[in-house]
Image (tube, grey):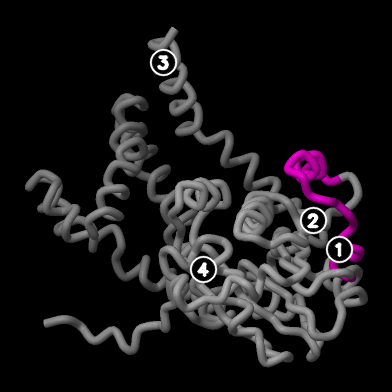
Amino acid sequence: MTENLGAPLPVFHDRDCDPSIIQGKRVAVIGYGSQGRTHALNLRDSGVRHLVVGLKAGSATRETAQADGFAVMTAAEAAAGADVVAVMVSDEAHRDLWRDELAPAMQPGAALVFAHGLSVRFGLVEPRSDLDVILASPKGIGPRIRDLYEAGEGVFCLFGVHQDATGGAHALGLSYAAALGCGRKGILETTFKDECESDLFGEQVVLCGGVAELIDTAFMKLVDAGYPPEVAWFECFYEVKLVTDLMFERGVAGAFGKISNTAEYGAYLTGPRVIGEASRKAMDEVLQEVRSGDFVRRLMTDHDAGSPDLQTRRAALGRRRIEAVGAHLKAVADRARD
């Protein structure tokens, strides 16, 4: 019997979107990193003729944007002449960018587009009431989204309207998301709150925090027990991609149908022990920290101090033994090609 998962989110495809809406707008993409470059290139290739890039002075991506054929100006200058301002800089930079450059420059009736709901959900940005505020969050890493677009494909997108000052925010948001190539796959309508909170939880518990710690802890457990680091690396790290690719292709149940009986039976016995009551309690705590804003307050406190905690943790991660073993095995593979 299929479990009741509740009403599905509304889904839109290219046939539901009007490309002429975004094509007729003056668009400013603020930031030209992984997401910013992809948004700008895909929008232009989808027929957006009036598009500029806004960057801070001395930005490392200025030359890339200019080489791609875009006019580059300050964020304030770009926003002042735009009907749509897409904010593609890092989350922690949104507060000052909005306060100092975008808010004073944006014209009434313009649209503010975000690829992630954090800064609006937690008040780092408090948009003026005369602006449309739209979420267009493609579910993928920027370069991969671009590659799929060029191949005539797309990625799923989470889309939402936080504020509709003009009455046209919904249609504009769909047009924008479709121009990224997401209408080829599916544009799912949600809210800034649900996208932001679930994204932070997923990143911390599964995608980045949980996976990284599980891999490294299991790796070191084998190494400390006397097993060769190279063997531990293969079993706890290298094969993760093989299994997750299989799960993505077939679902978890379908993937289990393709692995050995030994692996499958061991998974049933051991998975609930590793992700047991203590893990579920930790997940509850993480979700509460996300919902309450505690995580974002900690993020911004560190950012305002110059990110010392982030930098210390980043450096420590690079010193883990699993990194050295991985580099060694990569060199082994490279020598085989010489």
The image shows residue 305, relative to residue 198, as above or below, that is above
Label 2 secondary element: strand
Which sits earlier in the primary sequence, circle 3 or circle 2? Answer: 2
Q: Which residues are magenta?
A: 59-80
Q: Residues within 10 Å of mark 1 (few under 14, many from 20)?
A: many
Q: Position of residue 249 (x, y in %)?
A: 27, 53
Q: CA distance from mark 3 to mark 1?
A: 49 Å
* Picture quadrant where residue 167 is located: bottom right
Q: Residues within 10 Å of mark 2 (few under 14, many from 20)?
A: many
Q: Position of residue 13 (x, y in %)?
A: 44, 72
Amino acid under disc 2: Val
Amino acid under disc 4: Asp
Label disc, if present, on residue 78 of the rendered structure: 1
Label disc, if present, on residue 53 of the rendered structure: 2
Q: Are the two marked residues, 1 and 2, in contact with CB atoms closer than 8 angstroms?
A: yes
What residue does disc 4 label?
199
Label 4 secondary element: helix
Q: CA distance from mark 3 to mark 2?
A: 42 Å
What residue does disc 3 label?
332
Amino acid under disc 3: Val
Q: Quadrant of the N terminus?
A: bottom left
Nearer-the-camera pick, 222 or 14: 14
